[in-house]
C-alpha cells in the first residue's frame, strides 16, 4: 500500500499554474527524487505534500499520507507524519531555542516525549550530522551550512513517516554532504524520503527512484544534462594595484575561538577569486568585515587605497556590492524595479541617468519581464538575480557573492558566470564564496581556501 498518494494535483498562484495534473506515489521506506530547474514547481509540490497548502480555489486534486490529507492533520499528529525542510534553513529555526541542542529538542518537547528519549535523540543527531561541537551555540550564530544541518536534524528528531528535503545539500561543504547522505541512509527502513533538487548527484548516491518536473508537469527523468559552459573573458588580473588589501585582520565572535588571527590577502582588478572552505570557516564573516557590517578586533581593510575604519557602511557600499547568502533578507521594495533603483538613489545621479542605469542592469540580468512584480513573489533563482542586479547597478569596484550560485540550475549558473565575466571585463574584482568545485574550476581565476 502506498504511504503517499498524489492524484491529479493542480496548483495555481494567481494566474500562474505552478503544478499541472501531478500524480505521485511513495511507498513506506521508498526514496524518490524529483529533479527540476528553478521555478519548475518542486518546492510547491513538497509544501503541498507537507500539508502547507490546503484545498481551495487555487488547488485541485488530492494529496494523502496514510489515507489522510496532511493539511487537515492535527498539530499533534502532523509533525510525526511529515516533515518538510526548505531551501532557507534560517526560516525554519524556532526562534525559541538558545542552543543547537535545544533547537533539535524543540519538536519532541512539544510532543511531550520523555526527557530521556529527547536527550537520546539529540545526542544521536548532533553526532550523525556533525553538530556535537556546536551543541551549545546559539543557532542564529551558525553559518548557513551549519544551520542547514541543524534544520535537517530538527526534522529528523520528530521521526516522521515522510521526510521532504528541498535542495538539502545547497549550503553544505563536501564533507557535510557526506554526513547528510549517511544520515539519510541510516533512516528507519519504513521512512519515505522525497528529495527535491536541481542536480541529481545526491539522489544518485542514495539510489532514489528518479523523476523530473518541468513546467509543473511530472515526467520520467532524463539523465542527459548539458555541462556548465566555459565562459570567454578575462582570465587574469588586469592591474597590479590591489582594489582590496586585508592586512593583519583578527576577529572573533564573543565567547568563540578566533576566526581570523593576523589574516592577510589582496585582490586585484579583473580577478574572480573563489573563497572556499568548510562550513563555519569564516567565509561569510570575512565578507561582513570587508563591507563594514562587522568591525575587526585588529588589522585593516584597505579599499581602493583607503582604510575603511571610520567610514559608514553606506559609504563603503558605494564601492562594494554584496549579495548575501539568503537574498530574501536584503529585499524590501514593492517591485523589482524599485529594489534595483534603490542602489543608485544615493549616487548623486540625475533621474535620467538613474533610469538609464536601472534599465541597463535589468536587461543585463534578465529581469525586464518581472520588473513590476514584487521580488518576494518570484522563484528563488529570480530573487537571487534581483539581489545581484541591486549590487551591479552601482557599478562597484568590488563585488562580493556569498554562494550566489547555490540552488541555481545549470542555465542560471551560466547566466551568473556571464555576469561575473562582465564585471571582470570592466575592471572590477569579484570574490565569490562557493562549495561547487565545478563552478570554481570553470570560473575562478584563483582560489583562496579558509581553514
Image (cartoon, rainbow, N blue to C red):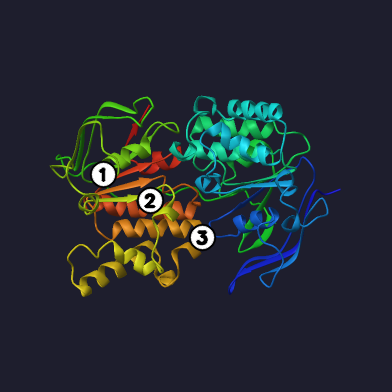
Label 2 element class = helix
Q: Is residue 359 left or right of residue 41?
A: left
Q: Closer to the N terminus: mark 2 or mark 1? A: 1
Residue drawn 32% across the image and 41% down it:
287
Image quadrant in which the C terminus is located: top left
User: Dot 2, crowdedness within 10 Å: few (<14), some or many (≥20)?
Assistant: many
Write down the residue under mark 1: 292
Q: Closer to the N terminus: mark 3 or mark 1? A: 1
User: What is the spatial separation of the Cα atoms under label 2 and label 1, in whole angstroms?
Assistant: 26 Å
Snapshot quadrant of residue 442: top left
x, y percentage for residue 258? 34, 26
Q: Pointer 3 and pointer 1: residues touching (CB < 8 Å)?
A: no
Write down the residue under mark 3: 379
Residue drawn 73% across the image and 49% down it:
78
x, y percentage for residue 152? 60, 39
Write down the residue under mark 2: 417
User: Dot 3, crowdedness within 10 Å: few (<14), some or many (≥20)?
Assistant: some
Label 1 element class = loop
Residue drawn 62% across the image and 39% down it:
106
Q: Is residue 345 above or below residue 434?
A: below
Nearer the observer: mark 3 or 1; the answer is 1
Amino acid at each position: 500500500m502506498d504511504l503517499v498518494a498524489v492524484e491529479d494535483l493542480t496548483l495555481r498562484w494567481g494566474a500562474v499554474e505552478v503544478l499541472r495534473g501531478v500524480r505521485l506515489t511513495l511507498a513506506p521506506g521508498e526514496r524518490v527524487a524529483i529533479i527540476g530547474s528553478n521555478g519548475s514547481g518542486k518546492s510547491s509540490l513538497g509544501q503541498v505534500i507537507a500539508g502547507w497548502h490546503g484545498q481551495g480555489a487555487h488547488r485541485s486534486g488530492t494529496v494523502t499520507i496514510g489515507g489522510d490529507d496532511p493539511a487537515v492533520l492535527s498539530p499533534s499528529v502532523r509533525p510525526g507524519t511529515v516533515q518538510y525542510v526548505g531551501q532557507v534553513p534560517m526560516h525554519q529555526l524556532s526562534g525559541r531555542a538558545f542552543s543547537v541542542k535545544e533547537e533539535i529538542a524543540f519538536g519532541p518537547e512539544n510532543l511531550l516525549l520523555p526527557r530521556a528519549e529527547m536527550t537520546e535523540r539529540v545526542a544521536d543527531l548532533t553526532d550523525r550530522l556533525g553538530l556535537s561541537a556546536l551543541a551549545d551555540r546559539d543557532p542564529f550564530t551558525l553559518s548557513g551550512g551549519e544551520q542547514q544541518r541543524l534544520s535537517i536534524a530538527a526534522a529528523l528528531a520528530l521521526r516522521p513517516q515522510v521526510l521532504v528535503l528541498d535542495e538539502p545539500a545547497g549550503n553544505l561543504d563536501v564533507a557535510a554532504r557526506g554526513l547528510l547522505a549517511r544520515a539519510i541512509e541510516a533512516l528507519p527502513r519504513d521512512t519515505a524520503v522525497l528529495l527535491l533538487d536541481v542536480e541529481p548527484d545526491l539522489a544518485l548516491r542514495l539510489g532514489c527512484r528518479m523523476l523530473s518536473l518541468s513546467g509543473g508537469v511530472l515526467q520520467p527523468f532524463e539523465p542527459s544534462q548539458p555541462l556548465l559552459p566555459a565562459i570567454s573573458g578575462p582570465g587574469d588580473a588586469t592591474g597590479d594595484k590591489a582594489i582590496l588589501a586585508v592586512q593583519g585582520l583578527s576577529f572573533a565572535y564573543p565567547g568563540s575561538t578566533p576566526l581570523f588571527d593576523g589574516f592577510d590577502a589582496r585582490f586585484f582588478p579583473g580577478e574572480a577569486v573563489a573563497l572556499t572552505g568548510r562550513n563555519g570557516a569564516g567565509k561569510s564573516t570575512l565578507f561582513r568585515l570587508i563591507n563594514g557590517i562587522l568591525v575587526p578586533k585588529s588589522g585593516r581593510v584597505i579599499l581602493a587605497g583607503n582604510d575603511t575604519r571610520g567610514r559608514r557602511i553606506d559609504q563603503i557600499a558605494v564601492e562594494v556590492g554584496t549579495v548575501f547568502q539568503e537574498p530574501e533578507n536584503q529585499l524590501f521594495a514593492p517591485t523589482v524595479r524599485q529594489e534595483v533603483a534603490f542602489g543608485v538613489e544615493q549616487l548623486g545621479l540625475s533621474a535620467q541617468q538613474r533610469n538609464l542605469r536601472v534599465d541597463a542592469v535589468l536587461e543585463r540580468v534578465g529581469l525586464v519581464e518581472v520588473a513590476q512584480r514584487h521580488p518576494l513573489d518570484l522563484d528563488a533563482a529570480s530573487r537571487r538575480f534581483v539581489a545581484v542586479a541591486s549590487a551591479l547597478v552601482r557599478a562597484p569596484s568590488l563585488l562580493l557573492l556569498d554562494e550566489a550560485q547555490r540552488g541555481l540550475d545549470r542555465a542560471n549558473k551560466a547566466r551568473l558566470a556571464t555576469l561575473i565575466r562582465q564585471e571582470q571585463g570592466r575592471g572590477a574584482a569579484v570574490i565569490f564564496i562557493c562549495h561547487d568545485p565545478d563552478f570554481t574550476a570553470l570560473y575562478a581565476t584563483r582560489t583562496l581556501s579558509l581553514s
